[in-house]
């Protein structure tokens, strides 16, 4: 898996101050996507053990609430393969951090992906330019839903 960016102090993609990982690879190709370069699975840098360690270090301060994984799309099969052991590692090492996954797929169509067992929240649905609403929290268009899988 490749990734396009890591933001170590993000306040736009979930509550609190977060670390955000933007993975590469997306088959949805939403019109008006704010990062179409991430559609390409080869875009960016390889996701390595060093990358994992960098993210875990960035997540460690008490004032960081959690990790958001966006894209591209983390639910693409190629991305799930790399993310599954990484998210498991985060939950084992930093159990108080929440994990948000953003996907253009609908939660009902994702089925029983093992990634969901590590996600606290899934923001689902394709970005639809005609439903764009800059006033929404943590999503870009009105059709997208915030699905709370676990509540503390």
Image: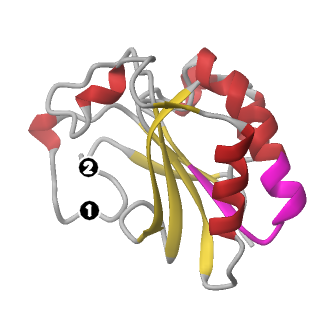
x, y percentage for residue 59?
A: 66, 67
Distance between the Cα atoms at labels 1 and 2?
Answer: 7 Å
Q: Is residue 90 magenta?
A: yes
Q: Residue at x 64, y 45 (%)?
A: 51
Q: Is residue 72 magenta?
A: no
Residue 75: mark: none
Direction front: furthest residue: 50
Q: Dividing the picture into quarters, in which one does residue 88 lie? A: top right
**Tags 1 and 2 in contact by the CB under 8 Å rule?**
yes
Q: Residue at x 44, y 21 (%)?
A: 25
x, y percentage for residue 36?
A: 24, 28
Q: Is residue 103 left or right of residue 148?
A: left
Disc 2 is placed on an element classified as loop
Q: Quadrant of the N terminus?
A: top right
Direction bottom: furthest residue: 63
Q: Residue at x 33, y 31 (%)?
A: 126
Q: Is residue 39 left or right of residue 8?
A: left
Question: As rendered, which of 39 and 75 lies closer to the eye?
Answer: 39
Disc 1 is placed on an element classified as loop
x, y percentage for residue 45?
A: 49, 32
Direction left: furthest residue: 130
Q: Is residue 31 left or right of residue 26?
A: left
Q: Residue at x 45, y 28 (%)?
A: 24
Residues drawn in magenta:
89-100
Question: As rendered, which of 55 and 127 lies closer to the eye?
Answer: 55
Q: Which residue is mark 1?
A: 136
Q: Which residue is mark 2?
A: 140
Q: Quadrant of the C terminus?
A: bottom right
């Amino acid at each position: 898996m490749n990734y396009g960016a890591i933001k170590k102090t993000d306040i736009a993609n979930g509550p609190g101050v977060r670390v955000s990982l933007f993975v590469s690879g997306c088959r949805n190709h939403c019109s008006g996507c704010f990062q179409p370069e991430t559609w390409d699975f080869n875009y960016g840098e390889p996701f390595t053990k060093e990358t994992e360690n960098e993210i875990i270090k960035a997540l460690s301060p008490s004032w960081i609430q959690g990790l958001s994984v966006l894209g591209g799309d983390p639910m693409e099969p190629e991305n799930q393969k790399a993310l599954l052991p990484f998210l498991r590692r985060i939950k084992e090492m930093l159990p108080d951090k929440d994990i948000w996954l953003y996907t253009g797929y609908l939660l009902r169509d994702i089925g029983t992906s093992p990634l969901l067992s590590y996600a606290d929240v899934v923001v689902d649905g394709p970005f639809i330019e005609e439903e764009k609403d800059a006033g929404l929290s943590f999503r870009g268009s009105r059709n997208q839903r915030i699905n709370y899988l676990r509540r503390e």
